[in-house]
Image (cartoon, helix red, strand yellow):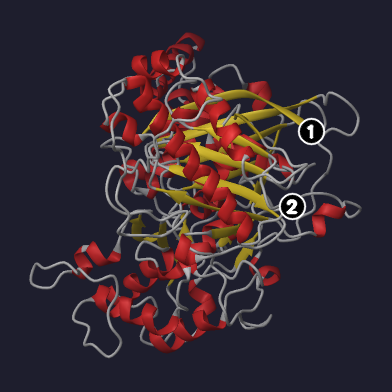
Amino acid sequence: GGGGLGGLTSRGASGGVDKETKNIFQRIEGMEAVEDVDREWENLVKEVEGKFGEADEGGTGENESEEEDTADGRGADAAPPGEFSDVASETGIHADLSIENDPTEGDCFVGFDLGTSGARMSIVEKTPSSSDGDPPAYNEVFTASLAWDDIMRYDDAYAWRAAVDMLMLRASVSGKEDVLSRVKSMCVSGTSATCLLVKKNTLDISREARMYNYDIASSSAATNDGKTLKSKGAKAGKHADTPAERVLQLINTFVPEKHTARANTGSLAKLLLWNEESPIVDDAGETQEVLCHQSDYISLSLMHEGDDEGEETCVVASDWHNCLKLGYDVQSLCYPAWMNALLKEGANIPDPESVLPSKVVSPGEPMGFISPVVAAKYGVPGDVVLVGGTTDSNAAFFAAAGARPEYGTAVTSLGSTLAMKQLSKTFVEDASRGVYSHRFPRFGDENDADEGEEAWLIGGASKVGCAVLRQEGFTNEALSELSAQIDPESDSPLSYYPLIKKGERFPAADSSKEPILDPKPDDRKDYLHAILQGIGDVERDGFRILGELGATPERPTVVLSCGGGAKNDMWIAMRERRLREICNEGQNVVVKRALNTEASYGAALLAAASFE
């Protein structure tokens, strides 16, 4: 059931070990001479290393999938408990799986990230805490990555599973056998709103994946006589000629205004489009297919590989973060009533809950045990736990801030655009400003006061960012040389808004917002000073807006910086000074560089969190 390496050649059927993986091990098992085995194993290792390159190099990109300009997935008319039944007990999802708490020194945890440009694996090991009462400390003891290519395609679910197999194989042949034997749990992060359909109660893929950036309004399903939909939505009452137009009508009719599930790239839109193209239910109204997110698919394949063919026992489970753009109500923790009406009345699906993940768990919450086949193949214990996953950008927050950050911890990504996230005690949203909230998992024992508290990862993303530096001709060498000449304690007299093109989404959504990069001083140092100050001012105003909308605490206490811009120490000092301008008396904010921002590392920390 997981495709694996064999899925690339056989598009493997559900159940059993995939064909090419069998062939790999049969190449060795059929040999009697030790020297033949050693030689063939060495060839296999070279094949794998040729695919990976160096274990510590490469990466998965800048977590580009998250659409930061959406609001939260909370419905105004959330269904009461029972509107969609909790079927965990009857479907085998281990929602109340019991695991041993308090990881011991040497326990290891695995994180996988399926990013926009490749896949990465991280293994972290618990290390001694510096003092009593400190949270557990972890050290990354192994990491490896591979890049998507024409064979291992980023939009091929079999390639996702094969990538995980190859990463595990790389760990097993890299002298990390002892590390793998101490693994306790695994967690998978994937690109936001990337999903596919699987046959009910199996992991057989029935519709190929639609990625995070698949827009139903510009897809082939949106065309009529070669023309692509130009509108953002079909108007109520207007005749819909194409599958995409019919979906847009359904969304406009049933989904609340300003809801994140209204997005053309969301998983709800993709589900509805699949149903319009070919019904998900048969003529008798029986559900034949179920929605499955990228992270869900990999986690479930690791739990179900080797299931007997014909044994239909695999039930889709997902997590809060991946289900946000599906329409899941992250405040009431249920599917909302409008979603039931949409699927039943609008999409003609008699049993709406049957086409959705049957259980939605907290990221990091135990879901089930690893498949015995996978455990034996790679030398991990048979009681390894798979936990609820997350999206790639949220996994990057875990990497920077850890799985148990303090309220007020924030992460700013200084990439081509500027993204801000802050941990708040209160839910915050304002679609007009592109502000959204992800429910943040809280971990602890029954005596931990924090465990019962809600936590929200709030934030937004501006179109301002470091892309303007390339646009204006600053090389890495020039940035380093000129930054060393700038005094971070001094203000530039110029007031810039350094967009690269018209349109802004946060701190204020303004499609008519024009770039402001004039007047240009003669000195390139002064020009750079003004641009960096302008980006910093957008960051400052973003955190101010979050406070005005109700963030608790009102201001961040620490801002961890990631992305290319985080390498600039002068800019860190400048940004810290600008942020202090919005702090009240007695408040303070510290800005520093994040030590790790790889999503796979964040997923590994999330895997460990339930054991703390």
Which residue is denoted by mark 1 in the rendering? 136
Q: Is residue 56 left or right of residue 559?
A: left
Q: Residue at x 28, y 70 (%)?
A: 232
Q: Up-down: is 231 above or below 461?
A: below
- Is 291 in front, or is 569? 569
Tell me which amino acid carries mark 2: Arg
**Occupied quadrant, residue 478:** top left
Q: Which of the marked residues, 2 or 1, is nearer the chain's N terminus?
A: 1
- Name the residue furthest top: 35
Callout 1 secondary element: loop
Q: Up-down: is 28 above or below 610?
A: above
- Is 269 in front, or is 114? 269
Q: Report whether residue 506 is seen.
A: yes
- Is 213 in front, or is 502? 502
Residue 78 coordinates in the image, percent (x, y): 60, 79
Which residue is denoted by mark 2 in the rendering? 442
